């Protein structure tokens, strides 16, 4: 379950990373107004209040998305290794033959 959630979050962050890389921002007083297409009059506009320097949005936000992608990838790998270890412990048990020194041929040893 954790692996699936991590994969969905990574895809979500990749989408937002590509979205913020195509921003064109302009400063308007105490806030920064960013659009995806400056030529389109009805394009979606993102407003960041309290930001005086728009270069912080254009450079810092994609870096945070990349950091989140890397951390979620690490989490997905940990979940995959954990699922493999649980699977191996449960399903990769095989019988190795007779126990040594056992009087009966019916006693099998699990390895």
Image (cartoon, grey):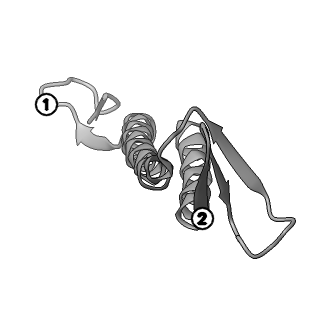
Location of residue 76 in the rendering, given as x and y in whole percent from the top left corner:
44, 44
Identify the residue shown where x is 80% and y is 73%.
40
Query: Do the CB atoms of the residues marked 2 and 1 lie less than 8 Å apart?
Result: no
Location of residue 60 in the rendering, given as x and y in whole percent from the top left corner:
42, 47
Q: Residues within 10 Å of mark 2 (few under 14, many from 20)?
A: some
Q: Nearer the viewer, residue 22 or 70?
A: 22
Distance Cα–Cα, label 2 vs label 1: 75 Å
Identify the residue shown where x is 21% and y is 23%.
103
Give the tally of numbered discs.
Answer: 2
Q: Would you name the residue on which mark 1 appears?
A: 100
Identify the residue shown where x is 35% and y is 43%.
94
Tell me the element at label 2: strand
| Depicted 49 relative to depicted 41: above or below | above
Q: Nearer the viewer, residue 38 or 76?
A: 38
Q: Would you name the residue on which mark 2 appears?
A: 24
Res 99 → quadrant: top left
Q: Residues within 10 Å of mark 1 (few under 14, many from 20)?
A: few
- The answer to whether residue 55 of the structure is visible from this angle is yes
Res 107 → quadrant: top left
Q: Is residue 87 left or right of residue 101?
A: right
Q: Quadrant of the N terminus?
A: top right
The dot on residue 39 is: none
Q: Nearer the viewer, residue 25 or 88?
A: 25
| Depicted 85 relative to depicted 32: above or below | above
Location of residue 6 in the rendering, given as x and y in whole percent from the top left corner:
53, 43
Location of residue 14 in the rendering, given as x and y in whole percent from the top left corner:
55, 58
Tell me the element at label 1: loop
Res 41 → quadrant: bottom right
| Depicted 31 relative to depicted 99: above or below | below
């Amino acid at each position: 379950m954790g692996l699936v959630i991590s994969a969905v979050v990574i895809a979500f962050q990749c989408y937002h990373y590509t979205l913020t890389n195509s921003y064109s921002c302009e400063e308007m007083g105490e806030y920064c107004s960013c659009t995806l297409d400056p030529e389109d009059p009805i394009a979606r506009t993102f407003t960041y209040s309290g930001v005086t320097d728009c270069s912080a949005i254009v450079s810092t936000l994609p870096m945070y998305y990349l950091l989140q992608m890397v951390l979620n990838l690490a989490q997905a790998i940990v979940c995959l290794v954990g699922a493999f270890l649980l699977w191996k412990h449960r399903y990769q048990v095989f019988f190795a033959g007779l126990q040594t020194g056992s009087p009966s041929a019916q006693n099998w040893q699990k390895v």
